[in-house]
Amino acid sequence: MSQEFTMKPIAHIKSDFSTKFGVPRQSGLVDALEALVVFEPAYRNPDALRGLEGFSHLWLLWVFDQALRETWAPTVRPPRLGGNARLGVFATRSPFRPNPLALSAVRLAGVETTPAWGTVLRVRGADLVDGTPILDIKPYLPYADCLPEARGGFAAAPAGETLEVEFPPELLEAVPPDRREALRAVLALDPRPRYQEDPGRVYGFGFAGLEVRFTVEGTVLRVREVRPL
């Protein structure tokens, strides 16, 4: 029996990433990254969040709105494998799926009231581009959601920091102090596509209202320029 469901965002994320380039490849890799979950006007009812402060982590269910396609393919090329191997789409977290749904586990840093947006959630470790639509929020339950015996397949362990970051002090000064730790961690994770290793290429991405441009040679990432977007 064919069924269709209509969903609408309950919230959007306000994060430091203006594009998907640079966003960590999984949630929780950079705890220093802070973001806000801003609810749509119809859902700005603090009663809907009653009891949420008792949980340390949340699941965000969201839409790959920057990867929408009218068709789908049964296999994809995971960046984790260098883009050289094809695996089944349901064996990966690729954004190119029949239904472009994603989920991220984030740390709840606070429930706050703002003049402009009412009650918002401050979260850490989110891997969402600014403005990403969120469909639902659920509390993370350690006894049900943490399974130590689970196997991780081809992504059994996080890639972790792989690059040494050289950030000239005069360029670092352009970054707000409360964003510097997060930016360094994002750069150390190597934001380049896995299959690109051109030492002469200058990469760039938007972060906290800035464009950060860098090169990578071997295991050293050098920040070349920081300028306003």
Image (tube, rainbow, N blue to C red):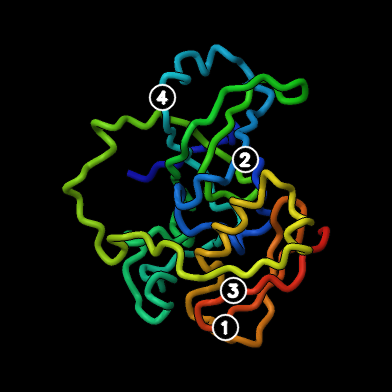
The amino acid marked with disc number 4 is Phe
Q: Residue at x 37, y 71 (%)?
A: 75
The amino acid marked with disc number 1 is Glu
> What is the residue that sits farthest to the left in this orientation?
149
| Disc 4 crowd, CA 10 A, few/some/many (<14, 14-19, 20+) | few
Q: Which mark is residue 221?
A: 3
Q: Looking at the rendering, in which quadrant would you find the C terminus?
A: bottom right
**Horizontal and vertical percent for residue 211?**
75, 62
| SS at circle 2 | strand
Q: Give the Cα separation between the discs numbered 3 and 4.
A: 37 Å
Query: In the image, is residue 43 above or below residue 212?
Result: above
| SS at circle 1 | strand
Q: Which mark is residue 75?
A: none
The amino acid marked with disc number 3 is Leu
Q: Which of marks 4 and 1 is in front?
A: 1
Q: Residue 217 carries which label?
A: 1
**Horizontal and vertical percent for residue 87?**
32, 71
Query: In which quarter of the view is residue 187 placed?
Result: bottom right
Q: Which residue is drawn at 74% across and 54% down?
A: 175
60 vs 20, left or right, is left
Q: Give the Cα separation between the discs numbered 1 and 3.
A: 7 Å
Ranked by sequence position, the earlier of labels 2 and 3 is 2
| Disc 2 crowd, CA 10 A, few/some/many (<14, 14-19, 20+) | many
> What is the residue that sits farthest to the front in this orientation?
169
| Disc 1 crowd, CA 10 A, few/some/many (<14, 14-19, 20+) | few
Residue placed under numbered mark 4 in the picture: 55
Q: Which residue is drawn at 27% across and 60% down?
A: 156
Ranked by sequence position, the earlier of labels 2 and 4 is 2
> What is the residue that sits farthest to the right in this orientation?
228
Q: Which residue is drawn at 63% across and 22% down?
A: 112
Q: Give the Cα separation between the discs numbered 2 and 3.
A: 28 Å
**Horizontal and vertical percent for residue 3?**
40, 42
